[in-house]
Image (cartoon, helix red, strand yellow):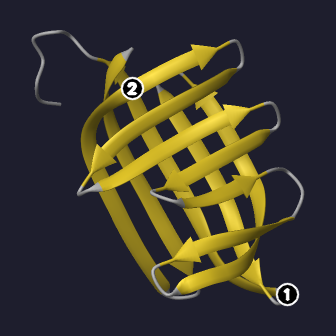
Amino acid sequence: MKVNIKYKSIIKYEDYRDTIEYYSQGHYDERGDDFELVFTTDGNRIKIEKLGDSIYLYNNDSRLVLRDEELLNDYSTPYGSVELVSKLDKFEYLKPNLKIKYTLSQNDEKVNEVFVVVKIMEKDDGDENI
């Protein structure tokens, strides 16, 4: 189904904090307890997918896998591939709000904490803005 999306992520490390916000239209597909949310903004294809106990975050060709346990990810960047360890700290989906908190580390050192909040709203056929 077509949806309107309000996306906000906060990337935090020590005193550093960056916020990214998107307002977009996309597609949402629910399959039991699993789902897929896809939208494009600023030329980037963003996809959030829940399959079983795993959360998959995509940004174009880059993919990050999150679970309650630490996982080694081979994350693609414009500068090459980086090995990052991810851990899902919190996952909450109370429609229409999706909240994800995860930690990334490299060589046993925390790189950052990321908080993602997404509001998924059904799109009316005549609604072109969110």
From the top left corner, tell me how far across and down residue 45 is, in percent: 38, 50
Q: Nearer the viewer, mark 2 or mark 1?
A: 2
Look at 39% across and 14% down and name the residue there: 1
Q: Is residue 74 above or below residue 80?
A: above
Give residue 31's position: percent from left, percent from top.
65, 14
Question: On the rendered image, what quadrant is the C terminus found in?
Answer: top left
Taking the spot 85% from the left edge, 87% from the top edge, the residue there is: 108
Neighbor class of circle 2 (other Cα within 10 Å; few <14, some 14-19, many 20+) is: some
Q: Is residue 22 above or below residue 52?
A: below
- Element under disc 1: loop
In this orientation, which residue lies closer to the viewer: 15 or 128?
128
Q: Hey, which quadrant is residue 114 in on the image?
A: bottom right
Residue at the limit of the structure toward the right, as seen here: 69
The residue under label 2 is which amino acid type? His
Give the image location of residue 37, x and y in percent: 48, 32
Where is residue 111 drawn, in percent x and y?
66, 83
Q: In the rendered image, which residue does mark 1 sit on?
A: 108
Q: Which residue is mark 2?
A: 27
- Going by the image, does 113 lie left or right of 3? right
Q: Nearer the viewer, residue 28 or 116?
A: 28
The foreground one among 118 and 56 is 56
**Dot placed on the residue nearer the N-terminal end, 2 or 1:** 2
